[in-house]
Every structure is written in C-alpha cells, then in structure tokens.
Image (cartoon, grey):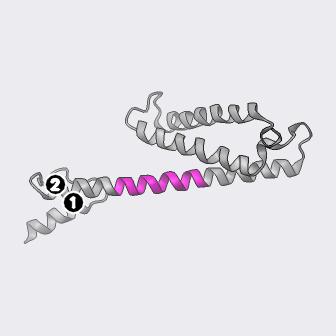
Amino acid sequence: MTLFRNRHLFLSDLVLLILAAYLSFVLRLDSPDPKEYRSAFVLFTALALLCIPLIMWRAGIYSRYWRYASVDELLLLAGSVTIGVVVTAALSLAIAFFVAGALHDHAAQRQSGSFATGAGADHGRGRCRRDDRARAQE
C-alpha cells in the first residue's frame, strides 16, 4: 500500500475538486444554481475528477510522506496541478468545440430544410445568417 499511502488526501482532493468546479461556475455566472450550464458543469467536473487525480497519482503525489516535504515536493505538486489543469481545460474545450460544432451543423441542416426562416437562424457562428443573406440576394 506504499503506492497509495495518502488515501485521505486523495479523497479530500476529489471532494475539493467538485467544490472548486462548482464555485468556479457560481462565481462566473453570479448564480448559485447554474441551470443552463449544467451539462458543461458535469463535463468539466468529470474531466477534472478523472485527469487531475490521475496525473497527481502518476507524479507520485499520493505516495509521498508529506510530513517532511521540501521545495522539491512543492515544485512537484505545483507542476502536477498545472499539468492537470491544462489537460482538463484542453480536453473540455476540445469536447465542447466538437460537440457544439456537431450541434450547430445539425441545427443548420434542420433550418436549411423545412424550418428555414431566416429570423434567429444565427447560432453563434454567423454561418446561417450569411447563407440567408446570400439566398436573398439571388
């Protein structure tokens, strides 16, 4: 059990990661209940709970004897947290980009069919509104 000596630190990291993700959404959105962003919250929290503890475990954070920690352990901790945050952010942005892109393409296909109205067809990228203007000029 020497590889996983600090089980209590691991469990506290999991709880604190969930709390940090929730507080980041609350502070950003100025609302204690981020209803509209629940799927983004779940995605980000799941990725954080997967990536950060895994990277910290691979770096040996949970197998150290923290009573005698030095500057080397502090640098290891800071580096592993930084790498974990960067990996989590990159994965969440990549997933959000591809999912949002797929959803936007699906919505654009639906509107170009029988639901094409032109009003309110812009879903964030401007592609639908440009297509409507081009059709109106023809």
Q: Quick one: label 2 or label 1, which is nearer the N terminus?
A: 2
Q: Please tell me which residue is depicted at 84% across the width and 43% down the height of the picture.
A: 64
* Residue type beneath disc 2: Gln
Front-lying residue, 4 or 122: 4
Residue 39, given in percent of the width and then of the height, sits at: 41, 39
Residue tagged 2: 111
* Residue type beneath disc 1: Cys
- In terms of image quadrants, where is residue 23? top right
Find the magenta span and give its range: 87-101
Front-lying residue, 127 or 92: 92
Q: How crowded is mark 2: few (under 14 residues within 10 Å), some or many (20 or more)?
A: some
Lateral position of residue 40 relative to residue 87, left or right: left
Residue 80, given in percent of the width and then of the height, sits at: 72, 51
Lateral position of residue 100 relative to residue 22, left or right: left
Q: Which of marks 2 and 1 is in front?
A: 2
Q: Are marks 2 and 1 in contact (CB under 8 Å)?
A: yes
Residue tagged 1: 128
Q: Please tell me which residue is depicted at 71% across the width and 47% down the height of the picture.
A: 56
Residue reaching furthest to the right? 68
Considering the image in quadrants, where does the C terminus appear? bottom left
Residue 133, given in percent of the width and then of the height, sits at: 15, 65
- In terms of image quadrants, where is residue 36? top left
Q: How many dots with numbers?
A: 2
Question: Mark 1 falls on what kind of element?
Answer: helix
Question: Mark 2 falls on what kind of element?
Answer: helix
